[in-house]
Image (cartoon, grey):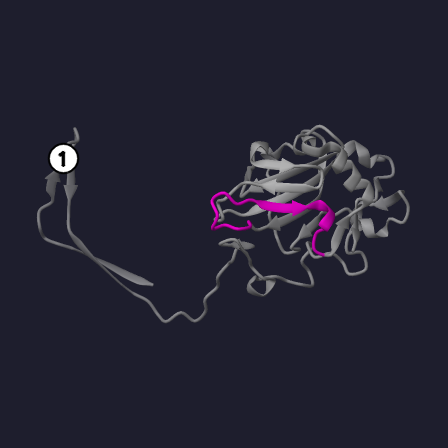
């Protein structure tokens, strides 16, 4: 793009605008020209106006993108056959839904400070946005896309109830609106059904499920994770 500024020959005029110092005004003409665009590249967010954007509209490398789970092991928990099993830390991934979402847990979330480690991260949209009194409901027992929580984890969330919204038990549930943690007063959780009261559909919402790090039983010598079964394929 080429631009040109043409200044007038008029003398600048002082304009105080009720200020203690003088401002000067000048008139000018700015002319620019540009060629016809040869290409247009648009980056879409994962959520746009409360609608999930399909991966066909995003610039993604389906072969090399590390967020897409390897086909043989769609999630590292898939290789766990017993209640406890040594799993190489190379398979240690977060279940990310949709897989192409690149949102990262903000550092101020306090997960790692409280020794929690996220194992499932999901984007979700708000329900009934036309109703200012409406709410969004998410049931853990319904699963997440092609994944579901194991009975052990579901029973632990059920036992915790609303305490799962705070860093207290072995598992924790959090909701983020963009980069901001949604206050627990805007949430209700009975151990299975989560109710989100937020109504601002212009924001992106993420559900994070985390587990207290000590429950993994880290073996620093062998550099492996000893994990119990958390997530499985439906």
Label 1 SS: loop
- Is 206 inside the magenta-drawn segment? no
Give left or right: position of 201 versus 4: right
Q: Position of residue 72 (x, y in %)?
A: 81, 60
Rendered residue at 77%/41% (across/down): 154
Give left or right: position of 114 versus 233: left
Give left or right: position of 122 versus 37: right
- Is 137 inside the magenta-drawn segment? yes
For residue 135, which quarter of the picture?
Answer: top right
Q: Position of residue 7 (x, y in %)?
A: 16, 54
Task: Please provide the residue range marked out in magenta.
Answer: 126-145
Q: Magenta stretch mostly in which secondary structure?
A: loop
Q: Which residue is mark 1?
A: 16
For residue 57, which quarter of the picture?
Answer: bottom right
Rendered residue at 15%/32% (across/down): 18
Q: Position of residue 38 (x, y in %)?
A: 43, 71
100 and 210: which is toward the camera? 210
Q: Position of residue 32 (x, y in %)?
A: 27, 63
């Amino acid at each position: 793009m080429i631009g040109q500024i043409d200044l007038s020959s008029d003398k600048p005029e002082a304009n105080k605008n009720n200020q203690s110092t003088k401002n000067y005004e000048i008139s000018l003409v700015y002319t620019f020209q540009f060629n016809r665009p040869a290409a247009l590249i648009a980056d879409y967010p994962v959520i746009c106006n409360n609608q999930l954007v399909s991966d066909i509209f995003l610039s993604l490398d389906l072969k090399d993108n590390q967020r897409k789970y390897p086909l043989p092991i769609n999630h590292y928990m898939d290789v766990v056959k017993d209640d406890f099993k040594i799993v190489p830390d190379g398979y240690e991934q977060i279940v990310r839904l949709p897989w192409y979402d690149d949102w990262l847990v903000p550092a101020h979330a306090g997960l790692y400070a409280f020794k929690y480690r996220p194992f499932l991260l999901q984007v979700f949209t708000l329900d009934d946005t036309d109703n200012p009194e409406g709410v969004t409901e998410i049931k853990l027992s319904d699963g997440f896309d092609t994944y579901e929580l194991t009975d052990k984890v579901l029973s632990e969330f059920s036992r915790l109830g609303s305490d799962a919204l705070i860093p207290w038990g072995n598992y924790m549930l959090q909701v983020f609106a963009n980069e901001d943690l949604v206050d627990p007063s805007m949430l209700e959780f009975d151990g299975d059904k989560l109710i989100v009261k937020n109504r601002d559909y212009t924001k992106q919402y993420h559900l994070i499920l985390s587990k207290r790090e000590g429950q993994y039983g880290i073996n620093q010598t062998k550099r492996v994770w000893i994990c119990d079964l958390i997530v499985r394929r439906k």
